Amino acid sequence: MGSGLVALTSTALSWARHPTNKISSSYLFWSLCLISLGQGGYNPSLQAFGADQIANDDELPSTKDEQKSNKKSLFFQWWYFGVCGGSLAGVTVMSYIQDTFGWVLGFAIPTIAMGASILLFWCGSRIYAYKQDDAISERPSRDIVRSIKEALSKLMNSRITLPNNNPGVVELELQDKPLCQNSGNAKGLKEEPCSGINYLVENGKVVLRLLPIWTMLLMFAVIFQQPATFFTKQGMTMKRNVGSSFKIPPATLQSAITVSIILLMPFYDALLIPFTRLITRDKKGISVTQRMGIGMVLSIIAMVIAALVETKRLEISRKMEVLDPKLETEVPLSIFWLLPQYILLGISDIFTVVGMQEFFYSEVPVRMRTMGIALYTSVFGVGSFLSALLISLVEYFTSSRGKGRSWFSDDMREARFDKYYWLLALLSVLSLVFYVIFCKCFVSRSSDLDNEN
């Protein structure tokens, strides 16, 4: 990512000196690609590595909250607090610098900050705690290839036999030995590591176990895309005046999400957690799955409020159109009516996003913690594509038949964002219902396994 920022700053500098240089466009594209690749690589790794620095006696995944310290929960909570603080500084301070002093300085400052952070991270390399699964081989690629060959050869040479005890029942059995036999201690595992194919199978089982919850969180990620798109377009048609001359940019309201997170995050620990401890009589207060569920409920309420505000805006717009069809599209409804939905989405982030980080980190083995954080980040990436797909489908069914008007018409007096918000709320409710059902089955099954052990 550092090299991408250096390339981006160099591109901006070249563009400032030679505005007609066509090579700068290609450099800009590749520098953005480097930044994207770097961010996708270091984000899950750094977050998982930071959480590993916190001492925790229970390294194995478990769903019993009373067996875990709340230190990890606090880490993810304040990690997200720092991310939101940096995001707020980016959209305020850096935007002002870029508009006032130019793109070169605006890109140079993050580049210098990234270089300083890399240097600081390197200086502390001797005092970091490095946690690794001893069962993992030092050369996993070679073991995986060897294990695939062994599995194929054993599969081809396996015998199919019938059981002798009950000739009336036909059962096929593969006469084979386990691909990996553990001796029961870490030393033995280290001396004779399990074959790579077995780790692939075990890792696949972990991912499949988390896949249902990952899928049910996608609708939250779809709602997460609305502030930067339809909320902003909705605000462009509303009254934005503050005083006689100043108009609020519609995109500025997106900072309300970040501000609400920064202001309300400390109250989560100071007020909500002690209150839930009294009710549940649990040291941790609420479980991670409950925390995510509360955030999903708040996001649904935000969509309902957004639909109601949009319905009100359309009613005023239609009354104005009846009086004067040539009147401008701006309606006499203050843009601050959008603040409740922004603030609710910020509060829902405190619950769901932080809960997702802790959940996907704690529900995987040590060797897969970076993969767990990657699963969390992939929810929002896939959710963005799902949002685009949903918009395309709605656009197709509402406009291509020629009978009705598109919900996403460029004319905001004809657009029906309210119906789209109701659709998102309905889909989120269905997702929440399946989430609650699955979490109950998930917790009960885990409790049964713990009782058996």
Image: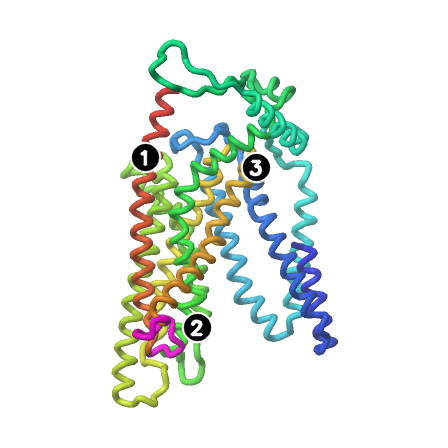
Q: Assign the magenta stretch its main secondary structure.
A: loop
Q: Label 2 is placed on what type of residue? A: Pro
The residue furthest top is: 165
Residue 53's disc is 3
The answer to whether any part of residue 199 appears in the image is: yes
* Residue found at x 65% / y 51%: 117
- Amino acid carrying label 1: it is Cys
Inter-mark Cα distance, 2 to 1: 43 Å
- Badge 3 local density, few (<14 within 10 Å), some, or many (20+)? some
Q: Nearer the viewer, mark 1 or mark 3?
A: 1
Q: Nearer the viewer, residue 165 or 391?
A: 165
How far apart marks 2 and 3 lie (CA) works out to 41 Å
Residue 379: x and y in percent read 46, 50
Q: CA distance from mark 1 to mark 3?
A: 32 Å
Q: Residues within 10 Å of mark 2 (few under 14, many from 20)?
A: some
Residue shown at 59%/45% (left/top)?
46
In magenta, the rendered stretch is 400-413
Left or right position of 285 against 117:
left
Which mark identifies residue 441? 1
Quadrant housing residue 447: top left
- Determine the secondary structure under disc 1: helix
User: Counting residues from the N terminus, which is met first, the one under dot 2 or under dot 3?
Assistant: 3
Residue on which disc 2 sits: 250
Label 2 sits on a secondary structure element that is: helix
Left-right relation of 138 to 387: right
**Helix, strand or loop status at disc 3:** loop
Seen in the image, is 6 located left or right of residue 76?
Answer: right
